[in-house]
């Protein structure tokens, strides 16, 4: 039995390469299951088939099955597994208490993790392939077997309750978790493949992630380099710089000592079995040479590759750079002109690899430098690189000022969020109680892997407190701590209390920002973070009696701010291909259902019409035009437009990119 994990930063091509690998193994007689652990999975899109958590046979090919771990399905399955028939015969009060436990914000992660370990326990396939979520979330998933087994063992020695109720309810899972840990660290059984692009930031992220994955005992590692430019593109001077960078990064990757594999950039969208089969055939050098020859051995390309001039043509969004710049400036100026005398918030949300960080930074640069607005760009992506893009050595929670005095950067770190939350919660508890039994239970609860999600949310929430001065939201230091009749700890701390007055209240942030821009994690995780606010709001209301006047004003303020269309703007970032469009549309509907309106789109990676003179890009540009019409019909929203450049955006060239994106 073999296991293969495909990981990497969002948008590097994990799903494409993992799906092609699964198909290739199946075609070669191996019974293969591919499982997506990404909350924003697009396996269904690439196989053009409706997939659920229960494995589904892929039509048109023997031996191939696929599954998408779905949070809702996992939760229901986990609930049935933990409770079984034990809920029968219980009185209504006990049932209500159990139901509330299953509504806790961390339960979905536990359930999804349980589904993941369930797949590892399977023995009825030759190979199981995991198409994982972007790096930061995958590293957490890989470390959970160790954390959960340790946590359960520790709780058994103590009070005997976990964040999901009595440890006896989940003790049976410890054997599965131990088996998962054993399999993950067995280099003869498990292969971990990092997918990257031949770019500095992608390579840096890969090396960092390799070190983290090695720290939990996974050592059988390979590096897959995707979107490598075909050699013949190098003859066009607009690709010369990127081609040289490709070669430099590939050479550096080879020096790491890990097995390296290259996958070339293809001029067509990879979607459906036929295109996946062609992608597999590209691994054959002779096939690849013949494939690329039909694009480059032609007189059609004789006039291409000159200066980056604009060719006027109505088929592309990037046919008239002046109009694009004016459109982008006008849209942001309209937001800026809204007569709201308080901090405004902008969220950029989208599939991994759509360019959320770049779009966030460009918008922040435009507002701070050319509109003289004090602007903070916050990354809530565990794999954030906003500091490296802007040439800032180190970025943490406390905002760092960049060269432009009005622009600041901040990153929410999962590690510091967890550490601060634990320390501050214990400190707050000790200020209001000296009950040793309660303290012991609290410490056990804080060591639960569930705690990270709560800690991360609290860090995110704190950025919305920066406007307190103008919004007159008072401090609330109420806490209710007690031991109930069963001997279990009840700790109800308001979202805004004394623990927020230490690490959570950054001393350097007394002044308000005009704009706070959130560069979010990939879609599923970003939505999860947002929806936590709604879950905490429900939990707060459920835990309050009808005449309770201790309403959590801070939490209500957060919800109201998120839903206020004049204070908070949501932009879905996408590019003109099927999968990012469909994922953006799913997010659009999820947000709408929660009462959040999307304000505008950010359409990225648009090819300039000049490239149409290179046959390699001709079909892709025509396909792009069709998808732009699909976007218009599906969303009917105002949009920002950003061009795709044949080089990596960094602090040396971002000013040039800014000028090519806005009317300056």
Image (cartoon, grey):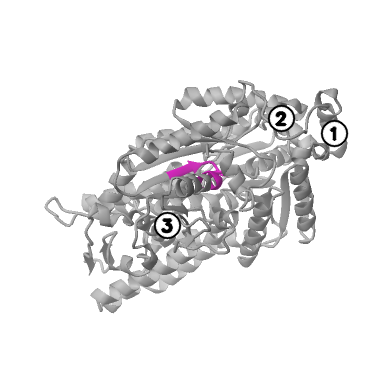
Residue at image location 70% in from the left, 35% down from the top: 308
Distance between the Cα atoms at labels 1 and 2?
Answer: 25 Å
Earlier residue among tags 2 and 3: 3
Q: What's the CA distance linking mark 2 and mark 3? A: 45 Å
Relative image position of residue 35 (x, y in whole percent): 59, 44
Nearer the N terminus, badge 1 or badge 2?
Answer: 1
Q: Is residue 620 magenta?
A: no
**According to the image, label 3 marks what residue?**
453
Q: Which mark is residue 195?
A: none
Q: Is residue 34 depicted above or below 549 in this figure?
A: above
Dot 3 surroundings within 10 Å: few (below 14), some, or many (20 or more)? some
Residue 551 spot, x, y in % from top left: 19, 54
Q: Quadrant of residue 169?
A: bottom left
Q: CA distance from mark 1 to mark 3?
A: 47 Å
**Badge 1 or badge 3: first in the primary sequence:** 1
Task: Magenta stretch: give its range.
Answer: 347-360
Q: Say left or right for 319 vs 86.
A: right
Q: Are marks 2 and 3 in contact (CB under 8 Å)?
A: no
């Amino acid at each position: 039995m073999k296991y293969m994990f495909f990981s990497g930063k969002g948008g590097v091509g994990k799903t494409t390469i993992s799906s092609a690998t699964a198909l290739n193994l199946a075609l070669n007689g191996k019974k293969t299951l591919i499982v997506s652990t990404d909350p924003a999975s697009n396996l269904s899109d690439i196989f053009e088939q409706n997939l659920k958590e229960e494995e589904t046979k892929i039509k048109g090919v023997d031996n191939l099955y696929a599954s998408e771990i779905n949070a809702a399905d996992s939760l229901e399955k986990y609930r049935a597994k933990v409770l079984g028939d034990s809920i029968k015969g219980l009185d209504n009060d006990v049932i209500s208490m159990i139901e509330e436990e299953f509504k806790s914000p961390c339960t979905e992660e536990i359930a999804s993790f349980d589904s993941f370990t369930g797949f590892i326990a399977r023995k009825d396939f030759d190979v199981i392939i995991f198409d994982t979520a972007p790096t930061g979330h995958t590293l957490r998933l890989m470390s959970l077997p160790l954390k959960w087994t340790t946590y359960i063992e520790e709780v058994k020695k103590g009070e005997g309750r976990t964040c999901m109720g009595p440890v006896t309810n989940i003790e049976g899972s410890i054997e599965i978790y131990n088996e998962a840990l054993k399999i993950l660290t067995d280099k003869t059984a498990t292969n971990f493949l990092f997918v990257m692009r031949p770019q500095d930031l992608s390579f840096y992220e890969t090396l960092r992630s390799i070190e983290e994955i090695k720290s939990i005992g996974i050592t059988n590692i390979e590096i897959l380099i995707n979107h490598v430019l075909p050699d013949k593109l190098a003859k066009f001077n607009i690709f010369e710089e990127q081609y040289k960078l490709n070669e430099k990064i590939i050479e550096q990757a080879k020096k790491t000592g890990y097995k390296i594999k290259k996958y070339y950039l293809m001029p067509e969208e990879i979607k459906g079995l036929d295109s996946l089969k062609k992608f597999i055939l590209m691994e054959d050098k002779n096939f690849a040479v013949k494939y690329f020859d039909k694009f480059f051995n032609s007189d059609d390309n004789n006039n291409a590759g000159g200066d980056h001039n604009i060719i006027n043509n109505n088929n592309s969004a990037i046919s008239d750079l002046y109009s694009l710049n004016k459109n982008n400036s006008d849209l942001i100026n309209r937001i800026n002109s809204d007569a709201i005398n308080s901090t405004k918030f902008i969220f950029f949300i989208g599939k991994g690899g759509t360019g959320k960080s770049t779009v966030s930074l460009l918008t922040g640069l435009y507002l701070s430098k050319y509109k003289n607005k004090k602007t903070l760009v916050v990354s809530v992506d565990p794999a954030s690189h906003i500091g490296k893009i802007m040439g800032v050595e180190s970025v943490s929670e406390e905002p760092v000022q960049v060269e432009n005095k009005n622009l600041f950067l901040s990153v929410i770190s999962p590690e510091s969020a967890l550490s601060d939350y634990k320390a501050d919660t214990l400190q707050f508890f000790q200020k209001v109680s000296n009950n040793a039994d309660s303290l012991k239970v609290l410490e056990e609860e804080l060591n639960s892997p569930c705690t990270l999600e709560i800690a991360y949310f609290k860090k995110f929430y704190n950025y919305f407190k920066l406007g307190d001065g103008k919004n007159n939201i008072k401090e609330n230091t109420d806490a209710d701590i007690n031991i109930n009749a069963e001997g279990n700890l009840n700790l109800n701390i308001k979202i805004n209390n004394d623990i927020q007055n230490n690490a959570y209240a950054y001393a350097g942030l007394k002044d308000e920002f005009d704009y706070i821009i959130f560069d979010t994690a990939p879609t599923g995780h970003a939505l999860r973070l947002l929806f936590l606010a709604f879950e905490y709001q429900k939990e707060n209301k459920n835990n309050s009696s009808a005449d309770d006047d201790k309403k959590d004003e801070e939490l209500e303020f957060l919800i109201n701010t998120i839903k206020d269309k004049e204070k908070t703007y949501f932009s879905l970032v996408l590019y003109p291909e099927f999968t990012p469009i469909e994922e953006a549309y799913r997010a659009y509907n999820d947000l709408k259902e929660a009462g959040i309106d999307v304000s505008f789109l950010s359409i990225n990676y648009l090819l300039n019409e000049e490239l149409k003179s290179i046959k390699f890009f001709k079909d892709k540009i025509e396909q792009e035009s069709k998808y732009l019409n699909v976007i218009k019909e599906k969303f009917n929203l105002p949009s920002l437009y950003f061009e795709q450049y044949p080089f990596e955006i960094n602090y040396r060239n971002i000013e040039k990119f800014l000028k090519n994106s806005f009317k300056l």
